[in-house]
Image (cartoon, rainbow, N blue to C red):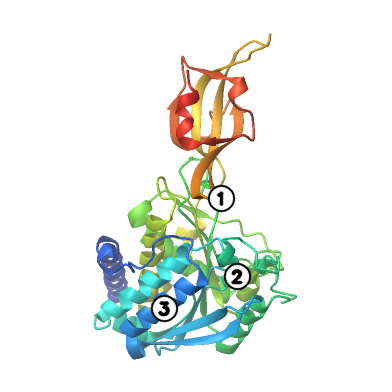
Amino acid sequence: MKRILYLLVFVMILQLADAQFSKTLFDTYDVYKFNGISSKRMKHAELMTHLEALKQSLGTLVTIKQIGSSAEGRSINLLTLGSGKTKIFLWSQMHGDEPTATMALLDILNYIALHKNSAEVKKILSETTLLMIPMLNPDGAERFQRRTSQGIDMNRDALRLQTPEARILKATRDTYNPEIGFNLHDQDPRYTVGENGTVAVISLLAPAFNVERSDNAVRLRAKKIASELTLVLNQFVKGHIAKYDDTFEPRAFGDNIQKWGTSTVLIESGGWKDDPEKMFIRKLNCVGLLSVFYSIATSAYEQTGTQPYENLPMNTKNLYDIIVEKVTLKFSDNRPSIVVDVAINKEEVKDSTGTYWKGRVVDLGDLSVFTAHEKINGEGKILDANDFELGDILKVDDVRKLLK
């Protein structure tokens, strides 16, 4: 009985220490974040410049090794930190337009450089080996597009391995055989948490390794790590964490890396109001990952169980960027006026003058079951049906001007 009591006390102490570490990371983020990043549209050359600067700060704590090249010849690099027995493998920007975690990895490297003598960093680097591929699809990043320069969604190339980038990822996993993996992505920023309508800032998944979605020791460990990450993030964005659909996808890397024996957690960075450059979500990635590294180093996550992850609401899609509510839609012909809600989503548009935001009209009618980052009261106001139709692109700033 005494032994059980001592064990419970020890676990509580570890959990309190983890929570305090997470809170400190969150509260002091502006002190250690990597300041060289100006935009989420970071290209390969800029990343390499940043990595060189961080290598100077980290010294012998990091090795940077080119492990291959993209289809267009850009280097794909592996960063290694630490000498611990538990290997943690992280790969980011498999899709070229999903850069949030890439920025967070630079923050993590900067934190380690600035806090190399702290007890937490020493523990992480002595108990784990961190293996990071910060930009797996540099050709896609160059174009800010999902697919590789050969037009392939790399996350559907885990079996045929036709792309050089996919072969590099598979070879790296097989070479190091890491116990734990983090598959780092961005999802549509309009996903929501269950049916409550709040935006899903982060969605997590411990992928299935078979059609039956069975559990084995590898997947159960992934679920425990996802649970630990859930507890960390709930300190800062409670109610904004969702669970990604775990239907088995036989061609996907996350599902197969789980199947090959690496406990894998998918992190999907979603949306947050007034954060188009994903800077707040980058912060959450940084804080969450560093916290979980420490929890893995101390083995505290093993006491977490799987329920915090299992109990997460599912990813749903009930969000628009803007809804103009109960506005009167007026027609110039004999059709009668009607009262509608109008949904508008923001889109990035790039032309010769630069990159800017416009809005696309995506739905109209009774949208009372949906939520939005911004709701505009249209009661008593008129929209002229001649001014827009479904699919139209509008300047976001002009939306209010249409209301008469």
Tell me where residue 297 appears, x and y as whole percent. 37, 80
Q: Secondary structure at mark 3?
A: helix
Tell me where residue 9 appears, x and y as whole percent. 27, 71
Query: Can I make out residue 95 in this image?
Result: no
Tell me where residue 203 appears, x and y as whole percent. 50, 56
Q: Quadrant of the N terminus?
A: bottom left
| 243 and 191: which is toward the camera | 191
Q: Secondary structure at mark 1?
A: strand
Query: Tag 3: residue type?
Result: Leu
Real-space Cα distance between discs 2 and 3?
A: 18 Å
Q: Which residue is mark 2?
A: 139
Q: Which residue is mark 1?
A: 351
Locate residue 329 relative to residue 39 in the image: left or right. right
Locate residue 256 relative to residue 176 in the image: left or right. right
Q: Which residue is mark 3?
A: 51
Real-space Cα distance between discs 2 and 1?
A: 20 Å
Q: Is residue 125 above or below residue 344?
A: below
Q: Is residue 310 above or below residue 114?
A: above
| 363 and 145: which is toward the camera | 145
